[in-house]
Image: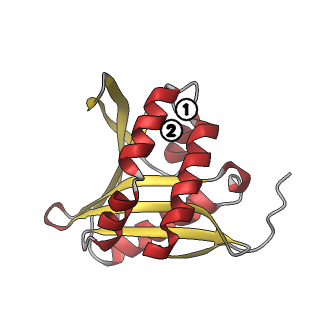
Amino acid sequence: MNKLNALPTISPAQERDQDEIRQLARETWYLHYPGIITVKQIDYMLEQRYAPEEIQRLIASPHCNWLKIELEQAIQGFGHFDEDASAHSIKIDKLYVHPRAQGLGCGTSLIRYAETHYGRLGFKKISLQVNKGNLASIAFYLKLGYHKEKSVVFDIGQGLVMDDFIMSKTLY
């Protein structure tokens, strides 16, 4: 049983949060992804996506929004959202909740917050990529009203691929 008892708070991530975000990503990926993707791919993707300069670049971008969710004054999860204003769409580029906080509504809260926020701004669609073998996450997104739009395979270098579903939802 989980021992976190406080209500979660959602706020924009700041540059000062990047070390905690990087550590949370590392812990979450190594607890969740072995068996779905190789450790080699985990190492490679963490290096690409969570390098300090990459996080700084994305936090500073006017087309990105990083949100953190905190329980008991510690970041338990985060989301990174890419805005495409010309297409009136949002991509959930990163959404991770540490296993110790899963089942407490953190992921749902982050997604609902983003859906409400971007819906109010006039965005019409929200989408994401999820590994085809990530059955728990696929079930989570289906439960929240997302549907599988298409199947994609992306070469990410070093002989590695992302074999994903694109899932999406219409915002009202």
Residue found 59% across the figure and 55% down from its top? 24
Q: Quadrant of residue 117?
A: bottom left
Q: Residue 37: tell me if it is visible.
A: no
- Specify whether 89 is left or right of 98: left
Element assignment for label 2: helix
Which residue is at the front of the view, 14 or 83? 14
Q: Quadrant of residue 132?
A: top left
Residue 66's tag is none
Q: Residue 46: tell me if it is visible.
A: yes
Identify the amino acid type marked 1: Leu
Dots 2 and 1: beta carbons under 8 Å? yes
Q: Which residue is mark 2?
A: 138
Colour treatment of the image: secondary structure
Q: Which residue is mark 1?
A: 135
Seen from this angle, which residue lies furthest top?
A: 159
Q: How far across and down, in percent of the image, does residue 167 sit?
A: 37, 43
